[in-house]
């Protein structure tokens, strides 16, 4: 195996662990025997984290390949390792785990485990960690992109700065307000920006 293949394999393991954690949380919500009070916001953010993880992983190979050919594989790999570690934590915090369900959201008579997704989503701990990690990820991506585009065109740097800045701003808003309209605006903006980015890569 080449050095690039080793690097991509390690990043792929981290991606697999994060998506597995997210899938396990979904499984716990839909399995029989649990009473779930559904809410669209945590599900929408989970969909965003899933799509963003896939998109970043897909782009990671070409970025690391170019860096490897230019003799810069080490620094680029370390930055991508940080990105995917933060994404793994975002996957882990996106939906409640079984222990949170049992300790925070009990059922009426104590016989059926229950989970309230709205209560979980708006809890201070979830908002602080999930959106703090997501905002930190986007800030780190923005800094890395500006360094990468240092010798690129001004248009490329501007587009990257606007897109990443929009994502960082949208992900930071939910930390400071519990207004549902603000949360829905933020998740719609992030999903829209990621959809635009994905469509731009496919079509252009």
Image: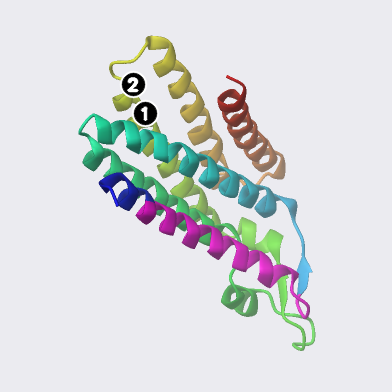
Query: Looking at this view, is 48 or 1 the one in front?
Result: 1
> Gap in Å between the C-alphas at discs 2 and 1?
6 Å
Colouring of the image:
rainbow
Q: Is residue 31 left or right of residue 25?
A: right
Q: Is residue 30 above or below residue 194?
A: below
Residue at (23, 40) in percent of width and height: 75
Residue at (40, 34) in percent of width and height: 62
For the residues bearing labels 2 and 1, Cβ distance under 8 angstroms: yes
Query: Looking at this view, is 91 or 177 the one in front?
Result: 91
Residue holding disc 2:
149
Residue at (47, 18) in percent of width and height: 159
Q: Main secondary structure of the magenta part?
A: helix
Q: Label 1: how many residues lie within 10 Å, few (<14), some (14-19) or many (20+)?
A: some
* Magenta range: 9-34
| Residue 56 place in picture, x, y as percent | 48, 40
| Residue 34 place in picture, x, y as percent | 75, 77
Q: Is residue 8 left or right of residue 176?
A: left
Residue holding disc 1:
145
Give the structural element (helix, strand or loop) at label 1. helix
Instruction: Judge whether residue 195 is colored magenta.
Output: no
Residue at (65, 42) in percent of width and height: 183
Q: Quadrant of residue 37?
A: bottom right
Give the structural element (helix, strand or loop) at label 2. loop
Return the residue found at the far left: 71
Q: Which mark is residue 186?
A: none
| Residue 189 place in picture, x, y as percent | 63, 32
Q: Is residue 179 above or below residue 158?
A: below
Instruction: Judge whether residue 11 is colored magenta.
Output: yes
Residue 139 visible (yes or no): no
| Residue 13 place in picture, x, y as percent | 42, 59
Return the residue found at the far top: 154
Residue 172 visible (yes or no): yes
């Amino acid at each position: 195996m080449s050095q690039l293949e080793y690097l991509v394999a390690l990043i792929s393991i981290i991606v697999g662990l994060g998506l597995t954690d997210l899938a396990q949380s979904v499984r716990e919500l839909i399995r029989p025997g649990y009473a779930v009070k559904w809410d669209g916001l945590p599900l929408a953010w989970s969909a965003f984290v899933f799509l963003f993880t896939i998109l970043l992983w897909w782009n990671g190979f070409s970025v690391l390949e170019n860096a490897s050919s230019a003799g810069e594989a080490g620094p680029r790999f370390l930055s991508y390792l940080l990105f995917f570690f933060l994404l793994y934590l975002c996957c882990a915090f996106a939906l409640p785990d079984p222990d949170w369900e049992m300790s925070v959201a009990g059922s009426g008579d104590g016989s059926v485990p229950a989970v309230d997704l709205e209560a979980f989503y708006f809890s201070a701990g979830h908002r602080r960690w999930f959106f703090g990690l997501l905002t930190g990820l986007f800030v780190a991506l923005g800094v890395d992109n500006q360094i990468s585009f240092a010798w690129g065109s001004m248009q490329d740097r501007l587009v990257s700065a606007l897109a990443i800045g929009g994502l960082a701003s949208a992900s930071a808003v939910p930390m400071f307000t519990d207004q549902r309209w603000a949360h829905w605006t933020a998740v719609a903006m992030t999903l829209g920006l990621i959809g635009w980015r994905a469509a731009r890569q496919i079509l252009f």
